[in-house]
Amino acid sequence: MDDTNLLTSLQRDSFDYFIHEVNTANGLIRDKTADNWPASIAAVGMALTVYTIGVERGFMSRGHAAQRTLTTLQFFADSEQGTGANATGYKGFYYHFLDMETGRRAWDCELSSIDTGLLLAGVLTSAQYFTQDNAIEQKIRELADMLYRRVDWQWMLAGSQLICHGWKPETGFLQWHWEGYDEALILYLLALGSPTFPIGPDSYAAWTTSYEWKCIYDIEYLYAGPLFIHQMSHLWVDFRNIRDDFMRTHDADYFENSRRATLIQQQYAIKNPMGFEQYNALCWGVTASDGPGNLVKKIRGVERLFFDYVARGAPFGPDDGTLAPWAVAACLPFAPEIVLPSISHFQHLRLREVNPYGFKASFSPTFQAEETHKAGWVSPYHFGINEGPTVIMIENHLHDFPWKMMRENPYIHAGLISAGFDGGWLAAGKTSVQNANTANTANNINKANPSALSEDEKI
């Protein structure tokens, strides 16, 4: 296959995860393909974005996608918001994992700020896409706007300038806040852009002061070890040629930074300082992923420590020889010249399945499983938060479609400008921010949740 056909085929296989691993009665998406496993709200946000791509690529009809989307948004709009231990959410936020059937909190997990952010990115994508003048698409826009406006971002600061990781009804706010460069870039932008409960630019400034700028393999960049951190916010936001104060100081932008992070990951595999099997220019990709298990195993005379699911990172670890093909595919817009050969290599290693769901989640050539595979140990599961970036970033690379939609979203505009971004496409479209408080959106929230309006918005 040529490159475009290869990528479209892989995209279609990953797309099917969101068609099959779903409860069609409420729109919830299973976190991973394991028996009795709960839903992930981050995977739901990706699904809402993936459905729009499915329509554009002919994978599903617009009517089917709109109905799926409406079912999902209606569930979140109607689900219990309260302090009860078995609620679905509180203050507009939602629990990280939800029971697939009941939609209630699973595993005593936290009310998650970042996963709510990823959910809302998909919610806003739905509103941006479904713009036809019919009852279903009008309702999608109304619900999406209400869900975004309902989130009390100020409450999630928990008395700090930095956004808190989350909250539990039994113990209150978690002790951790989002600091250091991480996947929270999209979270801060959404919180800054809120017309109802926005955080201030001082919060964003406090976050960026915790960044670490490093030079690794003679490449300077804003450091984060796991590859997914350099991808997650980019699923929805086109950071090409737009800069905040931090990036202006370093004469870069977040897109270029992710390109450099991608190149560093490949260089790490080439240098292979820990001597793992099969690490090379074609075989790389260290990120948060499934693993062989928490155990110690002697391999070729070397005692190796392996992990289960953990946020692996490069070059400073943790790393146990486990690689994630999906994370390489999701780097496609940043560095296609090194990603495309690696995608072909992973296929050669028989890490691609045609239904179900494209690439295997992760593999470890160093860890030899009982049933020998060309790639060593291979995860038996697929994960929604792996399949979503695969679909979305292939789409951004080939067609610029999700990025184009969200370049026109007034809330993303507002968040970027509040954070101090300027330049590129943003400088040409600042006036669209004014659309965030149009009569249409004001009427939507007034119908759904009038108490969430400020006095100015009620006028």
Image: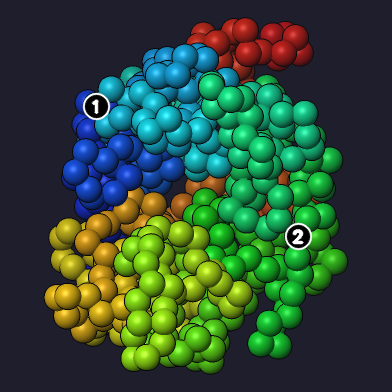
Where residue 211 sits, quadrant-wise, is bottom right
The residue positioned 50% from the left and 40% from the top of the image is: 115
Residue 9, how many percent across, how many down? 23, 67
Q: Visible in this render: residue 450? A: yes
Q: Nearer the viewer, residue 296 or 334?
A: 296
Image quadrant occupied by the N terminus:
bottom left
Judge whether 284 appears above or below 202 on screen.
below
Judge whether 363 appears above or below 132 on screen.
below
The residue positioned 58% from the left and 25% from the top of the image is: 171
Q: Earlier in the sequence, mark 1 or mark 2?
A: 1
The residue positioned 45% from the left and 33% from the top of the image is: 109
In the image, 212: left or right of 359?
Answer: right
Query: What's the residue type where badge 1 is placed?
Result: Glu
Where residue 344 sits, quadrant-wise, is bottom left
Query: What's the residue type where badge 2 is placed?
Result: Tyr
Q: Visible in this render: residue 403? A: no
Q: Nearer the viewer, residue 29 or 179?
A: 179
Report which residue position mark 2 lands on. 211
In the image, 257: left or right of 349?
Answer: right
Q: Secondary structure at mark 2?
A: loop
Which mark is drawn over residue 101? Answer: 1
Which mark is drawn over residue 423? Answer: none
Residue 319, how many percent across, how many down? 49, 73
